Image: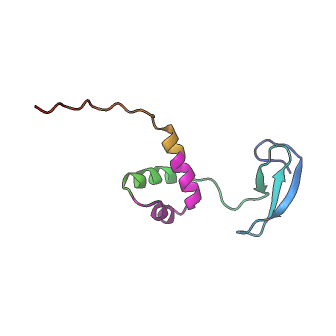
């Protein structure tokens, strides 16, 4: 077995996961925790596009997570990632002076 992040083979057991009861492992090289055969996959691009559309509708994150069937934790990380990509200083139209 090797680490999915760094491909090192220095793996140790690290308890049991609470959600699925599977053996949890930790890489001694990079510290990544993982299970050997994960049952949940990555979020598809289609789901990400749907999340983007729902975010524009100002729906609460918990509602989006239930609708799209993703975890609230993943959704919060995704929103934070989108926010970090936004430009810091957007150009603003100059204010008109009152006459």
Which quadrant would residue 50 be assigned to in this image?
bottom left
Q: Taken as a whole, is the magenta stretch helix, strand or loop?
A: helix
Please check the rendered image and state whether residue 76 is part of the magenta-colored stretch, yes or no.
yes
Point 86% across, 47% down: residue: 28
Q: Is residue 53 visible?
A: yes
- Write the residue at 87% across / 59% down: 13
Give percent across and percent down for residue 87: 45, 34
**Place of residue 21 in the rendered image (x, y in percent of width and height, measured from the top left):** 77, 70
Which residue is depicted at the point 38% across and 56% down? 58
In this rendering, position of residue 27 left or right of residue 59: right
Relative vertical location of residue 1 with respect to residue 23 in this rendering, above or below: above
Q: Is residue 66 above or below residue 92?
A: below
Query: Residue at left 53%, top 47%?
Result: 80
Q: Which residues are magenta?
A: 59-80
Of 99 and 51, the residue lying toward us: 99
Residue 96 in percent (x, y) is at: 19, 31
| Residue farthest along the left direction in this orientation | 99
12 on left or right of 66:
right
Q: Nearer the viewer, residue 94 or 52?
A: 94
Query: Is residue 6 in the magenta section?
Result: no
Instruction: Residue 49: give x, y in percent of width and height.
Output: 46, 49
Q: Quadrant of the C terminus?
A: top left
């Amino acid at each position: 077995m090797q680490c999915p992040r760094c491909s090192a083979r220095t793996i140790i057991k690290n308890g049991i996961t609470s959600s699925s009861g599977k053996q949890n492992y930790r890489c001694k090289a990079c510290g990544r925790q993982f299970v050997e055969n994960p049952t949940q996959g990555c979020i598809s691009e289609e789901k990400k596009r749907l999340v983007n559309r729902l975010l524009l509708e100002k729906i609460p994150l918990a509602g989006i997570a239930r609708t799209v069937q993703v975890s609230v934790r993943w959704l919060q990380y995704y929103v934070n990632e989108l926010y970090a990509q936004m430009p810091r200083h957007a150009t603003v139209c100059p204010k008109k002076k009152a006459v």
